[in-house]
Image (tube, rainbow, N blue to C red):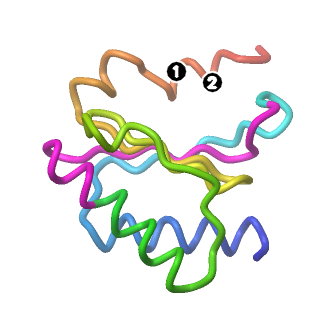
Amino acid sequence: MQISDLQAFVLDKIEDMKARDVQVIDVKGKSPVTDIMIVCTGTSKTHVKSISNHLYLEAKRNEVFVMGIEGKEDSEWVLVDMGDIVVHIMQQQTRDLYQLEQLWQSVGT
C-alpha cells in the first residue's frame, strides 16, 4: 500500500470512531522510525482503546500490516505502529502534557 493510501485508510478508520483534533505531521527526514505521525484525541480511556482497537481490526481485515501496539493497558496514550505511519491516540490531558505537534515542528529547525 502506498503511503498516501495508508494515510487515507488510517484517517478514515480513526474518524469512524469520532477521534478528535486529528493532526498529520510529516516527519520524513526528521525521524529514523517513520515518515508520518498522526496524532488524535479520544475523550476517555475507553474511547482511546476503542479507536485503537477499531484501527487494528480494520487493518487486519484489510490485510494492512501493523508492526505493534503499545499502551493499551492504560489507554491514556496508545501508539499504533504501521511502519511508514505511526498513530498516537491520546487523552486530552496526556496530549496537552507531551505536545507532540510542537515537539516535531521544532525538530530540524
| Residue found 55% across the figure and 74% down from its top | 9
Is 38 a magenta residue? Answer: yes
**87 shown above or below 55:** above
Question: Residue 35 is drawn in which quadrant?
Answer: top right
Magenta residues span: 32-50
Q: Which residue is mark 2?
A: 105
Toward the right, the furthest residue is: 29
Nearer-the-camera pick, 94 or 58: 58
| Residue 59 location (% of width, % of height) | 53, 74
Quadrant showing the C terminus? top right
Toward the front, the furthest residue is: 73
The kind of residue tagged 2 is Gln
| Residue 18 location (% of width, % of height) | 24, 64
| Residue found 45% across the figure and 78% down from its top | 58
SS at circle 2: helix
Relative to residue 49, is residue 71 drawn left or right? right
| Residue 91 location (% of width, % of height) | 24, 36
**88 shown above or below 12:** above
Nearer-the-camera pick, 78 or 29: 78
Q: Which residue is mark 1?
A: 102
